[in-house]
Amino acid sequence: MKQTAIPYFFMRGGTSRGPYFNRSDLPEDLDVLAQVLIAAVGSGHRLNIDGIGGGDAVTTKVAMLSKSQDDWADVDYFFAQVSVEKQLVDFKPTCGNILSGVGPAAIEMGLVTPQDGETEIRIRSVNTGAQVLAKVQTPNGEITYEGDAKIAGVPGTAAPISLNFMGVVGSSTGAFLPTGNLRDQIGGIEVTCMDVAMPMVIARASDFGLTGYETVQELDDNKDFFAQREDIRLQAGALMGMGDVSTSVTPKFGLLAPARDKGTIATRYFMPWNTHPSMAVTGSQCLASCAMTPGTVADGLLHRPTTSPANIVLEHASGTIDVLLDFSTETGFALRSAGLLRTARKLADGHIYVPARVWDGKDRSTKQG
């Protein structure tokens, strides 16, 4: 069987991991591209045994980079979420954890020239249009992955990567509150539908008979809850103007509860068909914004900070994540930017091989790096 070789970097970004490609090394046509990514990841088997995925949604993510033609940005970041078992690819969302590795990957690919000490990289999310300023550690003009920064959900420490997200309000639906309401009643459950970095449907854990402190396994084993939650998500997707979302990973779903470990608020995040082992970077911005907005389902679950910027500490299934929100309250809550600290590490590089019958290597993208 003939195979097509595709250069790649295999990286952990935040609490996710996957292949990072130069967009120009991949097919232009999105339908062909989807088949290439399915073959590379091994989608269609719960263990992704015929690819480099890891059998979990946080390990079947793909980043594709190119030099940006945008006046503001240095790098364009195109994201794809590949399903573990369904052989589907969703190009609608973005991923902030995988974005954590975009700066280092851009340097590794030669798309960005590192500076001495620290390199600022302006990243444009192709999927959502969001602008992100990443600061990557580059002592002596060389990328380093060694450092003292620690994030929940990843063992050990690594070099810090700071991310400042701008232009994330309404990034998918065009509105902070896509339904026009602070709260909606769907299937007998009160929810807040919000679009900040990631469109989400957010509810109180107690309204499902949950504490909000359940483990990932406890939630994944609760089939009745998942069925009820998915029905609400599908109805909410239509109300948010997103159409039929039955095969889309967006909108995502989140639960809120009072903090119990000195954080601001307790959270659980869903991807959406299983529970996230920690927390998505994009989801954290939406959940933090919901927590800070009066009138949402977060009312009564926290003491809201009143001055900006505010550090919102979200307790999640693996620990905590800090989201620094810069906001105004002159005409209600309005988010200006959100900052987070992440880490990344290069795990491998070389070539991924896909069957030539999937793609013969022709029709490469014109998006050059």
Image (tube, rainbow, N blue to C red):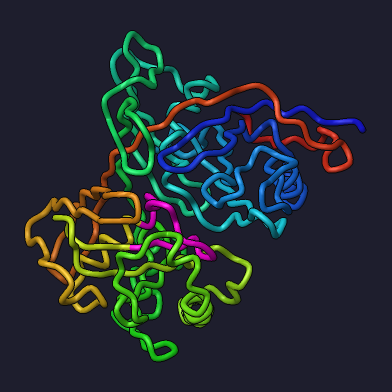
Q: Residue furthest top?
A: 140
Measured from the top left, where is residue 330 in percent x and y?
Answer: 12, 67
Span shown in magenta = 268-283
Furthest residue in direction right, as rendered:
1
Residue 360 horizontal side relative to residue 311, left or right: right
Residue 214 at x, y percent in the picture: 35, 65
Q: Is 273 inside the magenta-drawn segment? A: yes
Furthest residue in direction left, as rendered: 307
Q: Main secondary structure of the magenta part?
A: loop
- In the picture provided, is 135 more to the left or to the right than 29? left
Q: Is residue 66 above or below residue 164?
A: above
3 shown above or below 45: above
- Residue 238 shows in this picture: no
Q: Position of residue 118 (x, y in %)?
A: 30, 20
**Residue at image location 69% in from the left, 31% down from the top:** 25
Q: Quadrant of the N terminus?
A: top right
- Which of 314 and 319 lies nearest the eye of the viewer? 319
Residue positioned 85% across, 31% down in the render: 3
Q: Residue at x 40, y 39 (%)?
A: 14
* Looking at the image, residue 46 lies above or below residue 219: above
Q: Is residue 335 left or right of residue 225?
A: left
User: Is residue 4 magenta-colored?
Assistant: no
Residue 72 visible here: yes
Give the total of numbered labels.
Answer: 0
In percent of width and height, residue 12 lies at 48, 34
Quarter of the rendering occupied by the C terminus: top right
Viewer-closest of 310 and 333? 310
Answer with left or right where residue 24 lies relative to residue 32. left
Residue at image x 58%, y 42%? 62
